[in-house]
Image (cartoon, rainbow, N blue to C red):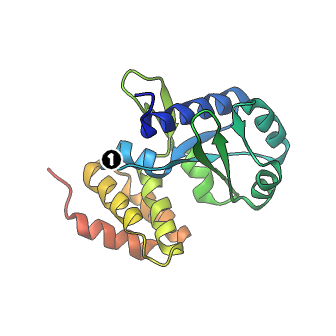
Amino acid sequence: MAGDASSDLIRALLEFLERLETAGLAHAVGGSVASSAFGEPRATADCDVVVSLPPGRLAGLLDALGPDWYAPRDSAARAVEAHSSFNVIHLPTGSKIDVFVTGPSAFDREQLERRVRRPLVRDGHPVWLSSPEALVLAKLDWFRKGGGFSDRQWRDVLGILKVQAGRLDEPWMRRMAGTLSVSDLLDRALRLQGPPPR
């Protein structure tokens, strides 16, 4: 397992999440790591973590990462100001984690309020994951921003909808989809899934 890329990535992610917990920063794992937990698994080369990171807390977080991590302070500071993203590198494994700084939008606020806690690995400690509903919407948003050409994002969306059919909070998804301007994409994805199982 030591040479396995996916195990190295999960190891780095769990270490990073520990640092966030220690710093008292609200966060949730997103991206394909979380969508694999709720939908159909697929390989990935990096991890996405959504973090509520006020400007005054950035220096403390970067200091807490310690010598095993590389984090460009200037890019991180710009991302915090712009509510965008920066990445950190876990030097022992070479794994990259993309940190998405939440903004003032209703979706950003509510995706952290609706996060769920569950282990990423068998017998592991539970961690915070974005809810399947929030993952669907975030991936539809990325799909649209990418010009509608990302097959991976669309497959992740359909995988979550298929595996979680009948268990999703569809009214919340539809309300948030309107704020993200992806209502048409959500309707299309839900139609492709057909009715939930009975």
Most distant residue in the left direction: 198
Image coordinates of residue 141 in percent, x first then y, are 51, 67
Which residue sits furthest bottom? 147
Residue shown at 54%/69% (left/top)? 180
Q: Residues within 10 Å of mark 1 (few under 14, many from 20)?
A: some
Task: Give the percent coordinates (x, y) of residue 56.
Answer: 85, 43
Horizontally, residue 85 falls left or right of residue 172, namely: right
Quadrant where the N terminus sits is top left
140 w.r.t. 99: above or below:
below
Residue 141 lies, with reference to residue 51, above or below; the image says below
Q: Residue furthest top?
A: 123
Observer-nearest residue: 89 or 179? 89
As drawn, 141 above or below 110 = below
> Residue 170 at x, y = what percent?
37, 58
Residue annotated with mark 1: 41
Please state the total of marks drawn on the protein image. 1
Left or right position of 155 against 31: left
Relative height, residue 62 to residue 183 (above, below): above
Look at the numbered disc 1 and give the secondary structure of its residue. loop
Instruction: Tell whether 6 sits left or right of 14.
Output: left
Going 65% across and 60% down the picture, which residue do you hit? Answer: 105
Residue 183: which quarter of the image? bottom left
- Give the residue displayed 48% in from the left and 52% down from the top: 31
| Residue 58 appears in the rendering | yes
Residue 166 can be seen in this image: no
Along the viewing direction, whichever of 156 and 69 lies nearer the viewer: 69
Residue 5 location in percent, x, y? 45, 39
Inspect the image, locate mark 1, and give the three-letter code of the amino acid beneath it. Answer: Pro
